[in-house]
Image (tube, rainbow, N blue to C red):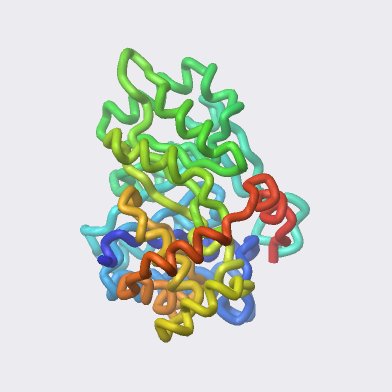
Amino acid sequence: MSVDRIALGLAALGRPAYINLGRDGALPPVRDVASMRAATFAVLDAAYAAGVRHVDAARSYGRSEEFLAGWLAERGHADVEVSSKWGYAYVGEWRLEADVHEVKEHSAARFAAQWAETLALLADRVGLYQVHSLTVDSPLFADEPLLEALAELAANGVAVGFSTSGPAQAAAIERAFAVEAAGRPVFSAVQSTWNVLEPSAGTALAAAHAAGKRVLVKETLANGRLAVEAPAAVREIAAAHGTGPDAVAVAAVLANDWVDRAVIGPASPAQLAANLRATALELTAAERDALAALAEEPGAYWRHRSSLAWD
């Protein structure tokens, strides 16, 4: 498996607090802006050196776009693909203990404002712009001005996609890819949660890939659960291969031929290196079956995810 199927996500680096387990000890002891910027640059440098050429950010990931823009300007790398997302606004004011860290709004006004903010930082570097956490009941589906604006963006050469969350991801995927504006599909890419604990979107994602849509998979480590609290089966497979449970979890994602990019979110170069061991790991059929048996009921998985604390 090749590293060119890996994308680096900046959710854990662009802001001081996030719900990923395993960030303590990986991030700077003081999470001020300068320290987090330096930590982001260190991971970006290590990822580039390892051959990763896709970086995924979002307007709600604190200063992730700002950090990425600064790194691109300083390093001069012209071969890095950038994707970002709109729909959530970061409101945590760089505080670990904020009552609310992000606020969601899928509207034409929010899209226009956040696309302008993204452009101001990343100009023409963004190749894929995604609706953040689209659900099947989103007002987006009935908002013709918003759909027309997204279609215009696509017509101007920026691929338009969406990410999904929640137990009804499959329904959201199917509904979104059926949306058209001016007789053309609006969306050409999807970024969904898929991991060995929550594989329920797999059939819909495979169908999307077969239809020519681009498929990115996020939360490959289940927000760190598969690294910090890995089930026994994951740990046993990792031990058999002489690697860590995180590599096994990422390898399980890459084993699906419908995955174009597996998005990983390391908080340090050491975590990145551990994650990337997945690209040299071939799981046997028996190991894949053992991992498939770990699937949780989607509702239970997402309730657990909602209970994770921002730290």
> Can residue 85 be spotted in the picture?
yes
Residue ID at (31%, 75%): 280
Residue that lies at the very extreme toward the left in this rendered image: 78
Compared to 207, does 2 lie above or below?
A: below
Q: Nearer the viewer, residue 130 or 15?
A: 130
In which quadrant of the rendered image does the N terminus lie?
Answer: bottom left
Q: In the rendered view, does 171 fall on the left or right side of 122? A: right
Q: Quadrant of residue 223?
A: bottom right
Q: In the rendered view, does 82 fall on the left or right side of 65? A: left
Q: Nearer the viewer, residue 34 or 164?
A: 164
Residue ID at (59%, 72%): 230
Residue 51 percent coordinates (x, y): 26, 69
> Can residue 69 be spotted in the picture?
no
Q: Nearer the viewer, residue 229 or 109?
A: 229
Residue 122 percent coordinates (x, y): 36, 49
Marks counted in the figure total 0
In which quadrant of the rendered image does the C terminus lie?
Answer: bottom right
Q: In the rendered view, does 92 fall on the left or right side of 189? A: right
Compared to 176, does 192 lie above or below?
A: below
Residue that lies at the very extreme toward the front in this rendered image: 286
Residue 278 percent coordinates (x, y): 37, 72
Residue 269 percent coordinates (x, y): 43, 78
